[in-house]
Image (cartoon, rainbow, N blue to C red):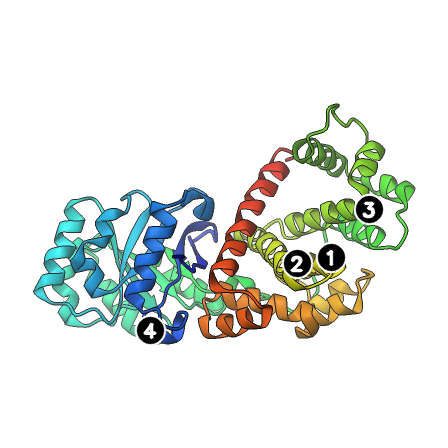
Amino acid sequence: MYSYVARQPILDREMKTHAYELLFRNSLDNVFPRISAQQATARLVAEQFLQQNIDQLLGGRPCFINFPHSLLLEGLAECLPQDKVVIEILEDAEPDDALLAKVVQLHRQGYRLALDDFTLSPAWERFLPYIQIIKFDLRATSLASIERFMASHRALPLTYLAEKVEDKGEFERMKALGVELFQGFFFSRPEMVQQTTMQPAQLVVMQLLNVVNQPELDLDRIEQLLNQDVSLSLKLLRYVNHLKSHPHPIASFRQAAGYLGHAQLKRFVTLIAATSAGHNKSAELYQMSLIRARFCELLAHTHAPTQQAQQAFITGLFSLLDVLMGQPLDQLLGPIPLTGEIRGALLSRAGNLGFYLTFCEDYENANWPKVTAGTARLGLNEEKVSNLYLAATAWVNEQLHAMAGAD
């Protein structure tokens, strides 16, 4: 038994991660073959909550879980901790008396409930006093309809969440209406195409990327660059001391560089590049970049040479660099001596590296039909892919802990 889970961030008005939705859809087209929506949710609950520590996946944040009508009536939601979950009632649930009774019961037990893809149907009116969150699908509901609904229900303490927000304009319009939470990949797309000026620290990082990607490591040049930003030297020392169980603390840059070696030093600089690129961007972007990097690397390890696995890591890590830096990706990659395979993967999803990155994106979007096809191409099974994703998430938590000590 296994659960196949992806998480999608839910952001607040400051674009900080408020929660995650654990994505199991409500049709066979959106899950692996032979798994119904009921089976998928039941397995998700059993695997993620009953058999392991859910905080490894959520990082202490709450999660939204889709529940079909039948599982709610069977009492599965009561197996979950009230402080960690939001029970999301699927849009195709029948708003009958039995469901209302269950909603009232869950409300009295302290559970938070949400109506998914809310249709504005009057049949749900009697449910609203027991609901905390209304989710509006912006692709299915007009702005005018949302505005009218919110205006006519001001007496109720409802929190509104906008789904499928595609651009910053929609984000700002929904904020103006009073919407508190947002879901969708609008934040993973470039917000502008014009070039913006890099901060001095960003310039140093980009120069470091250039140096560490050369065939021969120039320690003198790296040391010169690090001397321009003391915080980077400190990050390196703390990073090495945290991750390496060295019997003696490393006290100099040269000692740290020698201990890490060329490949690990390159990884350190690429991590720094991803986590310092966009100082005003959502922290979720940094985490997503790191998860992509590690997930791509683990996928590559399953059937590719070690060298390509290292390239897969950089491919995943740099896949959101345009968003973080606010500049076109081809322009950002210009001065960095990356391989043609990495460039092709990032700019046109070409080759094996492009396949790993596309697979990762499909997994993030819970595009299960494409994930199923990609899983077959990788020669893996669903359980193995799920375990690789969880391993990538756990690895990122460790990395972020190490990096946090340097700030």
Q: Quadrant of the N terminus?
A: bottom left
Q: Which mark is residue 262?
A: 3
Secondary structure at badge 2 equals helix
Q: Residues within 10 Å of mark 3 (few under 14, many from 20)?
A: some
Q: What residue would you read off at disc 1? A: 306
Q: Residue at x 28, y 73 (%)?
A: 145
Relative vertical location of residue 162 with respect to residue 79 in this rendering, above or below: below
Query: Which x, y percent locates residue 243?
Result: 66, 35
Badge 1 vs badge 2, beta-carbon distance below 8 Å:
yes
Q: Amino acid at mark 1?
A: Thr
Secondary structure at badge 1 equals helix
Q: Nearer the viewer, mark 2 or mark 3?
A: 2
Q: Cα distance, mark 1 to mark 4? A: 38 Å
Q: What residue would you read off at disc 4? A: 27
Relative vertical location of residue 98 with respect to residue 278 in this rendering, above or below: below
Based on the displayed image, in which of its 4 quarters is residue 292 positioned? Answer: bottom right
Q: Which mark is residue 238?
A: none
Badge 4 vs badge 2, beta-carbon distance below 8 Å:
no
Q: Cα distance, mark 4 to mark 3? A: 48 Å
Q: Is residue 213 left or right of residue 288?
A: right
Q: Which mark is residue 301?
A: 2
